[in-house]
Amino acid sequence: MTERQGHPRRTFLVQIAGCTACMLGGCRINLANESDDDGPLDAGGIIHVLPDPVAGVLTLPFSDFPVLRQTGGWVRGIPPAWGKPVIAVNTGGGYATLEAACPHRGCGVNYTGGLLFCPCHYSEFSLDGAILRGPAETPLGRYVSTVDATALRITLA
């Protein structure tokens, strides 16, 4: 009899069982995000700890957030003293600055493909906060912002 090359059958079966368990675990995690409870969810996107606002104005220095200099660059985060998520997007002709919590269930919205998208229940919003697709029934709140050579400033109050 000749010796066979490769993994023994038992090793192969153990690996298949492990992969199956991982896939099922991933499905369970995804189903958990589809919950119908009233608590806020969060999915996707990097959440930055933003600086605290001073006199109601959040300052995002380009030295700390260089992605905001690029068209399509965006930052989502929570200023600790404000406690509410904010998203800022460089639109190429200015900045869109909005509340970053979807009004449907509080999930964090992300910027993708020229719109704001809620990864939890798939609501979509334009860059002015208007609803493009539900289940959200109210638009995202907008913030007034100004920009100079060094920073984006968002008035939160």
Image (cartoon, rainbow, N blue to C red):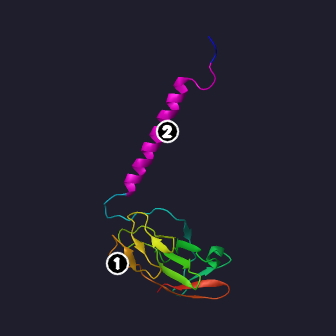
- Residue 2 located left or right of residue 10: right
Amino acid at the residue labelled 1: Thr
Name the residue nearer the viewer: 37 or 90.
Answer: 90
Q: Residue at x 66, y 75 (%)?
A: 66
Query: What's the amino acid at mark 2?
Result: Cys
Q: Which mark is residue 138?
A: 1
Residue under the point 64% across and 23% down: 5
Relative to 30, residue 48 above or below: below
* Residue 26, position as x, y percentages in the image: 45, 48
The magenta-colored residue range is 4-33
Is residue 85 visible from the viewing direction of this image? Answer: no
Q: Which residue is mark 2?
A: 19
Q: Quadrant of residue 131?
A: bottom left
Q: Residue furthest front?
A: 1
The secondary structure that dominates the magenta segment is: helix
Q: Which mark is residue 72?
A: none
Where is 88 relative to 47, above or below? below
- Asked if the residues shown at circle 2 and circle 1 are in contact, with their CB atoms under 8 angstroms apart, the answer is no
Q: Secondary structure at mark 1?
A: loop
Of the image marks 2 and 1, the number of the one nearer the N terminus: 2
Residue situated in front as seen by the camera: 92 or 129: 92
The image position of residue 36, as x and y in percent, is: 31, 60
Q: Provide the secondary structure element on which disc 2 rests.
A: helix
Residue 63 x/y as whole percent:
68, 77
